[in-house]
Image: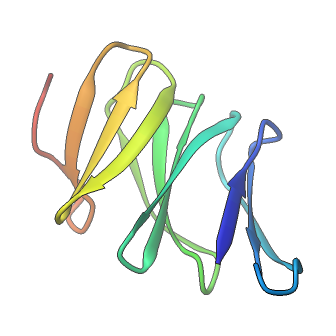
Amino acid sequence: YLCSSSYDFSIKIWDPSTGALLDTLTAHTGPVWTLCCWGDYLCSGSEDKSIKIWNPSTGALLNTLTAHTDYVCALCCWGDYLCSGSSDKSIKIWNPSTRALLNRS
């Protein structure tokens, strides 16, 4: 898959070999600033202060992670963990499988 995020609050999933739009994911209530693949999942961070975890094959929203007090502008995977950065000047480390926040800074 090729995924793109948008100021229109959506995420689009594309077939890179054909350019065809496969799905549009909508659940955020603000612009989507960052995307990250974590195993078979797609993670998205938004101005709505949330991180959403998706199954890109089905388009299903699996989890929503909340702990930031301002928009989520960075996501990266680190082993089994998901790291998020926010304009609230914090970095959070998550276990996306359990939705557990592993740090409070």
**Residue placed at 23% from the left, 35% from the top?**
92
Is residue 105 depicted above or below 53 in this figure? Answer: above
Q: In the picture provided, is 39 more to the left or to the right than 1?
A: left
Query: Residue 95, image x and y in percent?
Result: 19, 58
Q: In the picture provided, is 5 more to the left or to the right than 80?
A: right
Query: Residue 100, image x and y in percent?
Result: 17, 52
Is residue 67 depicted above or below 70 in this figure? Answer: below
Query: For this rendering, which residue is in front, 82 or 2?
Result: 2
Q: Give the residue at the far left of this rendering.
A: 103
Q: How is the image coloured?
A: rainbow
Query: Residue 28, image x and y in percent?
Result: 65, 45
Q: Quadrant of residue 46?
A: top right
Quadrant of the image for the N terminus? bottom right
Query: Residue 103, image x and y in percent?
Result: 10, 35
Is residue 70 depicted above or below 100 in this figure? Answer: above
**Residue placed at 35% from the left, 76% from the top?**
39
Number of marks in picture: 0
Q: In the picture provided, is 100 more to the left or to the right than 14?
A: left
Is residue 69 depicted above or below 42 in this figure? Answer: above
**Residue placed at 78% from the left, 36% from the top?**
7
Query: For this rendering, which residue is in front, 25 or 81?
Result: 81
Quadrant of the image for the C terminus? top left
Q: Give the residue at the far front of this rendering.
A: 17
Q: In the picture provided, is 33 more to the left or to the right than 96?
A: right
**Residue placed at 44% from the left, 36% from the top?**
74
